[in-house]
Amino acid sequence: MSEIIIYGLVCPIENIVMYVGRTKNAELRLRQHLDVARGGDRTVKSEWLRQLQEVGLAPSIKILDTCLIDEWQDREKHWIDHHRSINPELKTLTQAAVVIAAKTKRKFP
């Protein structure tokens, strides 16, 4: 069974997790986030990434957890809830995105 990485994008200014996501390849996923933001994506996360890029900064990626593919929803929700309790400005979308991804069996980058 495949392993999923739960990760956080860490603000280089405040040194706090600003986004929680999941992937199979953390470094590739970070590059994808930055590319999508540069391409004009209009999500809150991409707006934040563009603000960093405009001043020559980029987030770091922090591995928060690893789990089996059938456990990722609970683990991702745990880490979103945890980091949202620390930082209400977390850029992660609502839990609805987790449910939609599960129902559509979306592939992980």
Image: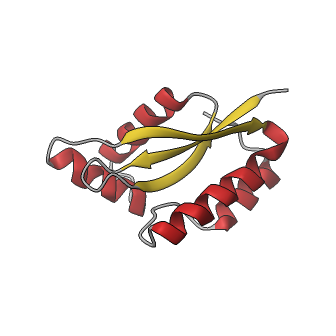
Q: Indicate the position of residue 81 as horizontal and vertical percent values.
A: 61, 66
Q: Which residue is at the front of the view, 17 or 47?
A: 17
Quadrant in which the C terminus appears: top right
> Is the residue 95 above or below the residue 29 in the image?
below
Please state the horizontal and vertical placement of residue 33, each as a whole percent of the image: 43, 41
Q: Quadrant of the N terminus?
A: top right
Residue plotted at (72% across, 51% down): 75
Question: What colour scheme governs how the chains and residues are painted in the rendered image of this protein?
Answer: secondary structure
Q: How many marks?
A: 0
Residue 56 in the image: x percent, y percent? 16, 41
Horizontally, residue 45 falls left or right of residue 94, namely left
**Quadrant in which residue 71 is drawn:** top right
Left or right: 86 in relation to 35: right
- Which residue appears farthest toward the left when viewing the image? 55
Residue in view at x 43 percent, y 46 percent: 9
Horizontal arrangement in the rendering, residue 63 relative to residue 38 (left or right): right
Q: Residue at x 36, y 40 (%)?
A: 34
For residue 67, which quarter of the picture? top right
Judge from the rendering whether residue 60 lies leftward or rightward of residue 99; answer left or right. Answer: left
Instruction: Point out residue 103 in the picture as x, y percentages from the top left corner.
Output: 81, 54
Say which quarter of the image contains residue 22: top right
Q: Residue 75 versus residue 49: which sits nearer the camera? A: 75
